[in-house]
Image (cartoon, rainbow, N blue to C red):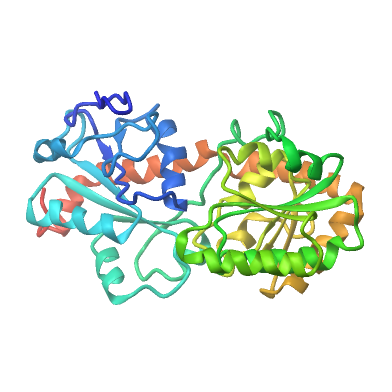
């Protein structure tokens, strides 16, 4: 028992999949683990390893369980180490090839850029590779399976509580339509593009306001300060609101009438799925997997240019036409529930695991240098 969190820890002999999480701060990868593992744990004995920063619902093995990984699990010929970062691939290689632990290595790649030589070296030594989108898969030099992320459609849904607001913020949003944006406040995430687009469109639409949620880390404080100055200079201080980090983003996606995902660079990008699962249409830049998630002209649109003007042109038709927005809302909800449920992602990942376990004999004969 983890006395700090009350978390139950299973026996290492029972665990057949380990999904390490070596990052202390919240990230897209961490969010994926938090959503997936409880669902996967209903079907297989899976646990995370790493700093004790994940929610208590996530099954976890402590570092003291490492020596037990030399023993085979009870029900499989080896465990699977499912890494999602370079810092998690490397320990897996050490454990499999140097310490000779009975492991096979899986890596999920979301990056949409040419990998460094070091990363290619690590990926080339994986037993199976997953890409989260066709675009990310195009940068891989090894065979891979494309498995897009899914979304928890029980958490992200049009039905449920709205944000708990009080004071000035409640008054600013009362009776208003809301264009939302969620993510860390920084240049990479395109928060400035969102602000510029909102400056352009809100001045002629008094029944709309814009809300950006998300944390600003210390190194981006000057960037946020610049945004606030720009908003104040244009007289939009009551219309474009940077509300900071929120405890639960799901109620906000229900409150948004339209969502903008403006990043310049993204790995996969879950927020468009979270918005659409909440019945909220999305306008996004052509980053991450957004073009593979959004049905153009049906659930929203993807803009080609990373500019506030391009976003402004894309949001205007949805803001000005309630019937168009309502149709996109219904289409978004149906699209995500059909194509992107979390259970679909968990099932497709399980198929990759099963393929590794089933081909153990051929692995031994064709790649005899690896631990058997």
Q: Nearer the viewer, residue 136 or 48?
A: 48
Residue 135 in sight: yes
Q: Nearer the viewer, residue 146 or 120?
A: 120
Q: Residue at x 48, y 43 (%)?
A: 345
Left or right of 114: which side holds 15?
Answer: left
Residue 119, position as x, y percentages in the image? 30, 69
State which quadrant residue 97 falls in. Answer: bottom left
Location of the N terminus (image quadrant) = top left
Q: Nearer the viewer, residue 102 or 323?
A: 323
Left or right of 3: which side holds 237?
Answer: right
Residue 201, position as x, y percentages in the image? 84, 64
Is 155 drawn above or below residue 202 in the view shown?
above
Is 159 drawn above or below residue 18 in the view shown?
above
Residue 285 in sight: no
Q: Residue at x 30, y 50 (%)?
A: 22
Residue 277, position as x, y percentages in the image? 66, 41
């Amino acid at each position: 028992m983890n006395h700090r969190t009350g978390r139950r820890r299973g026996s290492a002999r029972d665990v057949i999949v380990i999904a390490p999480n070596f990052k202390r701060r919240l990230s897209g990868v961490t969010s994926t683990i938090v959503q997936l593992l409880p669902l996967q744990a209903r079907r297989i004995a899976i646990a995370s390893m790493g700093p004790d920063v994940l929610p208590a619902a996530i099954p976890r093995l402590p570092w003291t369980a490492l020596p037990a990984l030399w023993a085979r699990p009870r029900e499989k010929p080896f465990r699977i180490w499912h890494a999602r970062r370079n810092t998690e691939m490397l320990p897996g290689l050490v454990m499999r090839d140097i310490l000779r632990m009975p492991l096979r290595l899986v890596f999920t790649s979301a990056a949409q850029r040419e990998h460094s030589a070091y990363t290619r070296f690590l990926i080339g030594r994986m037993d199976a590779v997953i890409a989260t989108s066709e675009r990310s898969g195009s940068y891989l030099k090894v065979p891979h399976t494309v498995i897009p992320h899914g979304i928890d459609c029980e958490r992200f849904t049009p039905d449920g509580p709205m944000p708990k607001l009080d004071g000035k913020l409640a008054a600013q949003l009362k009776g208003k339509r809301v264009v939302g944006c969620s993510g860390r406040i920084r240049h990479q995430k395109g928060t400035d593009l969102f602000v510029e687009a909102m400056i352009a469109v809100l001045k002629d639409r008094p029944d709309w306001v814009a809300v950006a949620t998300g944390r600003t880390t210390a190194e981006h404080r000057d960037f946020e300060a610049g945004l606030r100055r720009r908003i104040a200079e244009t007289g939009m201080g009551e219309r474009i609101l940077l509300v900071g980090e929120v405890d639960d983003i799901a109620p906000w996606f229900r409150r948004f009438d339209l969502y903008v995902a403006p990043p310049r660079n993204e790995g996969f990008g879950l927020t468009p799925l979270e918005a659409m699962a909440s019945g909220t249409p999305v306008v996004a830049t052509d980053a991450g997997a957004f073009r593979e998630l959004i049905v153009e002209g049906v659930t929203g649109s993807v803009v080609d240019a990373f500019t506030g003007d391009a976003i402004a042109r894309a949001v205007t038709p949805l803001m000005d036409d309630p019937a168009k927005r309502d149709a996109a809302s219904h289409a978004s909800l149906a699209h995500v529930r059909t194509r992107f449920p979390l259970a679909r992602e968990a099932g497709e990942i399980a198929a990759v695991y099963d393929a590794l376990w089933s081909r153990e004999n051929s692995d031994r004969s064709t790649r005899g240098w690896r631990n058997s």
